[in-house]
Amino acid sequence: MRNMRLTGPGAGSEKYDLLTALAVNGLAMGGVTQASMMRLIAVVTARYNWALDELSIGQKDMAALWSVDERTAKRETKRLIEAGLLEVKRPGVRGRVAVYRLNVAEIYRRSEPHWTNVGSDFKSRLGSRIAGAPPDAPAERKVVTIDFRSRSRAEPFDENARPDEHWRQAQLHLAEQHPSLFAAWFAALRLVTIHEDQVHLAAPTRFAAQYVTTHFLSFLEAAMRTQLGRTVKCIVTSEETR
């Protein structure tokens, strides 16, 4: 899944919070997880490109940073990917260094039970910023599968189409342009209404509604603009509050 880029005003504190979340998760879990979190923190601190939201580093450099051999570095990287904490942005082939990105949503999901270990202020801050919900609300994620095999491309704007058809075509557009985001976030959204220049969508949880609103609203509005032929404002609310 693609994450928000932590750049600009206020990004510094968000980066510290992200690293803190990794640290407290590792410390609470201990053992292999603790070592993995320490290694992930080290490589993120040393080499992560926040502007591009990516980590580009070869196995040899990774091994040197972690003070292990290349075989161990490869095994550790695989463990982080399987855990969902790292995602492969571009695989390393033909001598090209692999590029990874952090799965910020998964990091916060895994670390949420340990936020109180840092303090109530940390739990409240992350709960407000990331979930937009009460601090103890679970960061659930629901993925809905839609079969796009019969129509792989979004159709042109049709002013006579029903609202649900406009949304279906917007989903096709999103699935094509942002497949990982679609699978993780957009597929679970449901159209509530389209009224004039306002599109109301519903997410399955408050966490999902706030996260999409904060980070991906421009993608939704661009997709709906393509289908409706005019500029629109998207509003995402939670099914939990309906």
Image (cartoon, helix red, strand yellow):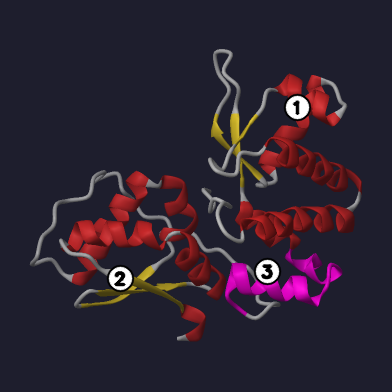
Dot 2: what SS?
A: strand
On residue 233, the disc is 2
Residue 230: image quadrant is bottom left
Residue 224: image quadrant is bottom left
Pick whichever of labels 1 and 2 is earlier in the sequence: 1
Q: Residue furthest bottom?
A: 242
The picture places residue 107, in percent across and down from the top left corner, at 68, 55
The answer for how far apart the CA atoms under marks 1 and 2 are is 44 Å
Quickly name the residue at label 1. Answer: 62
Q: Residue furthest right?
A: 31
The answer for how far apart the CA atoms under marks 3 and 1 are is 30 Å
Residue at the spot x=61%, y=69% of the render? 129
Quickly name the residue at label 3. Answer: 126
At label 3, counting other C-alpha atoms closer than 10 Å, the crowd grade (few under 14, some 14-19, many 20 or more) is many
At label 1, counting other C-alpha atoms closer than 10 Å, the crowd grade (few under 14, some 14-19, many 20 or more) is many
Q: Amino acid under label 3?
A: Leu
Residue at the spot x=69%, y=72% of the render? 125
Q: Is residue 4 above or below residue 217?
A: above
Q: Is residue 117 on the magenta stretch?
A: yes
Pointers 3 and 1 in contact (C-beta within 8 Å): no
At label 2, counting other C-alpha atoms closer than 10 Å, the crowd grade (few under 14, some 14-19, many 20 or more) is some
Q: Is residue 200 above or below residue 78?
A: below
Dot 1: what SS?
A: helix
Q: Which residues are magenta?
A: 112-133
Residue at the spot x=63%, y=74% of the render? 128
Q: Residue furthest front?
A: 9
Pick whichever of labels 3 and 1 is earlier in the sequence: 1
Question: Taking 73 as reference, is 172 left or right?
Answer: left
The answer for how far apart the CA atoms under marks 2 and 3 are is 26 Å
Residue 122: image quadrant is bottom right
